[in-house]
Image (cartoon, grey):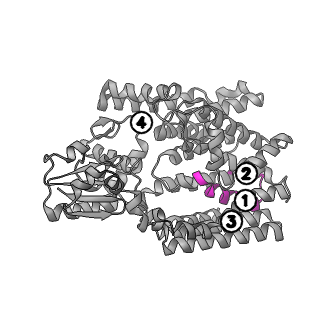
Amino acid sequence: MRNNYILSLFILLALLPILLFRDYTPSNELRYLSIVDEALRNGHFLTFTNQGLPYADKPPLYFWLLMFSRWLLGGHYMWFLGLFSLAPALVVMGVMDRWVRGEVSAENRFTGRLMLMSCGLFLGMAIVLRMDMLMSMFIVLALYTFYKMLQEEGSPRRNALLFPLYIFLAVFSKGPVGILVPLLSTVAFLSVTGRIRTVGRYWGWRTWGILLTGCTLWFIGVYWEGGPEYLNNLLFNQTVNRAVNSFHHDEPFYYYFLSVWYSLAPWSLLLIGIIGVGVWRGWVQTELERFFLTTLVTIVVMLSCISSKIAVYLTPAFPFFVYLAVLLLSRFRWNRWLALTIALPATVFVLSTPALLWIGTQPATLFMSQPFFYAAAGLLTLTGLLTLYCLYKKKELNRSINTMVIGLFIAVFVGGWGLPALNSRMGFADLCHKASAVYQEKKAVGYVTFNISRPESMDVFLHQDVKPISVLGLLTNDYRGNLLLLSAKAAAKSSTVRDFINGKENYTVGDYLIVVL
C-alpha cells in the first residue's frame, strides 16, 4: 500500500507541469467548460445546452465535478480539473494491483503499475478533461467487487450494495457502456466457467432494484428540467442510434483491432505478444487469468459491435490488457523475441534527440526548438540507452521496463515546463487573453471569427458569445468596432483576406491574428 502511495506521488509530480501549464483543447475540453458555464447561468444540473442547443451526449456526473470546481475556486483551473481524470487513473492502478496481489510477485506488480500508467492512451486519458477515465474507474471497481463476491471475500452485504452502486456511477459518468461492460463480462465469465445458473446471485433483485431506482430518479429529474424531447434524445438518440447506426465516429468492426497497437504503445508488442503466446500455449489457467481474459475479449468484441468508435472508448480494457500480461509474465524468461518487443520502443527513445534536432530546424515546426524539449529528448535518449543495456547486458526484463517508464516520466516532467511556448498553437487561452486586453483598450463592441474551428467555446475566456463570419461578411461594414480573430494560415492563403487586413491594426498570437475592425 505504501509503495502505491509513493508511486502515485511520483506520477503526480511528473505530470504536474502539464497540469499547471497546458491549455484546454478547443474540441472537447473547452466545450465542456462552456457547457458547464451555460448550465450554471441557466440553473440546470441534469440537462445541458451548448450555445443554447440541447446537449444530451453525456450524463451529468462529470459535469457536476466541473461545476463543483467552478463553484469552489471561482474559475476553471487545469491543475485542479485534471485531477478528475488523474485521480481515477491512480485508483484503477491501485485496485488492479490489489486484485493480483495474491498471484503476482511484488517485482512484477511494480512493473505492472508502471506499464499501466505509461500506456500511451491510458496516460493520455489520465491528463485530459474527459469522463472516460472516471467511467473506467467505476467499471474496474464493479468488476473487482463481482470477483470478491465470486470468491466469497469481504462482507457479502457490503459487496451486494457496492456492485450495483459502482455500475450506476459508471452509467452516470458516461452512459450505457457503464452497465454493458460489467453485465456482459460477468455473464460471459459465468457461462464459460459453467456457473451461469448462479447469475441471479450477482444480477438479482437487489442489483436491478438499485440500478432502476437510480436511473428512474435521474430520468424523472431530466423530464422535469428538460422536458420529453431532451429525455428522448438522452435515452434513444444518444444510445440506440449511436450503437446501431452512428451519426458520429462511425467506423468498421475491425477498428479496435488496428487502434489497439498505438493505444497500448510503447507496450503493444509486449502485452499482445505475452497474451497471445499465453493463450496459444494454454497458460491461462487460474480463475483470475480466465476472468481477465474473458473481460478483455468481451470489452473488445462489444465495442467493435457498436457503430460509434474512437480509440479512447477502449480505455476500460487497458487495465485488463496490462494485468493479464502481468499474471502471465512469471511463465516467461528472457529470450530474444521478448527482448525485441522492449528494444524497439527503447530504440525510438534513443532516436528522440536526433529527431527533435531535425524537427526544430524545419520552418513549420520551429516552435518545437525549446530548451525544455531538448532536455526532455536528451533524457529519453539516455533512458533508451539504459534500457537497452539492462535488456541485453543484464538480461533483466523487469529492470528494463522499469527503467524505461521512470525515465519517460522524468522526461515528461522536464518537457512539461516548455508547454507555455506551445499553448498559443494548441488552444485559445493566449489568443483570448490578448483579445480581451485589446478589447478593453479599443473599447470594441464584440468579437467575430473567421476560419477557426469550434470558436463558440471561446466564451469561457471572453465571457460573451463570438460570431463566426464568412468571407462575404468580412467585406461588409456590418462588424465595424468588433475584433476579428482568425487563422494566420487562412489569411496567408486568401488574397481577399490579406487585402482586407492590409492597413488595419493587428496582433499575432501563435497561429492566430487579432484584427481591429
Judged by depth in the image, the label closer to the viewer, 3 or 1, is 1
Rounded to the nearest whole Å, what is the CA distance between mark 4 and mark 1?
A: 40 Å
Q: Amino acid at mark 2?
A: Leu
Rounded to the nearest whole Å, what is the CA distance between mark 1 and mark 2?
A: 9 Å
Image coordinates for residue 428, horizontal then vertical, percent: 34, 57
Q: Is residue 479 above or below residue 362?
A: above
Q: Residues within 10 Å of mark 3 (few under 14, many from 20)?
A: many
Rounded to the nearest whole Å, what is the CA distance between mark 3 and mark 1?
A: 12 Å
Judge from the rendering whether residue 24 lies leftward or rightward of residue 403; answer left or right: left
Q: Earlier along the polypeptide chain: callout 1 or callout 2?
A: 2
Secondary element under disc 1, as helix, strand or loop, is helix
Asked if residue 362 is among those painted magenta in the image, a careful observer would answer no
Q: Earlier along the polypeptide chain: callout 2 or callout 3?
A: 2
Give the label on residue 57, or none.
4
Give the label on residue 344, or none.
1
Judged by depth in the image, the label closer to the viewer, 4 or 2, is 2
Secondary element under disc 4, as helix, strand or loop, is loop
Judge from the rendering whether residue 297 lies leftward or rightward of residue 314; answer left or right: right
Query: Residue sitting at 78 percent across and 52 percent down?
Result: 103
Q: Quadrant of residue 390?
A: bottom right
Query: Residue sitting at 28 percent across and 62 percent down?
Result: 433
Judge from the rendering whether residue 463 lies leftward or rightward of residue 287; answer left or right: left
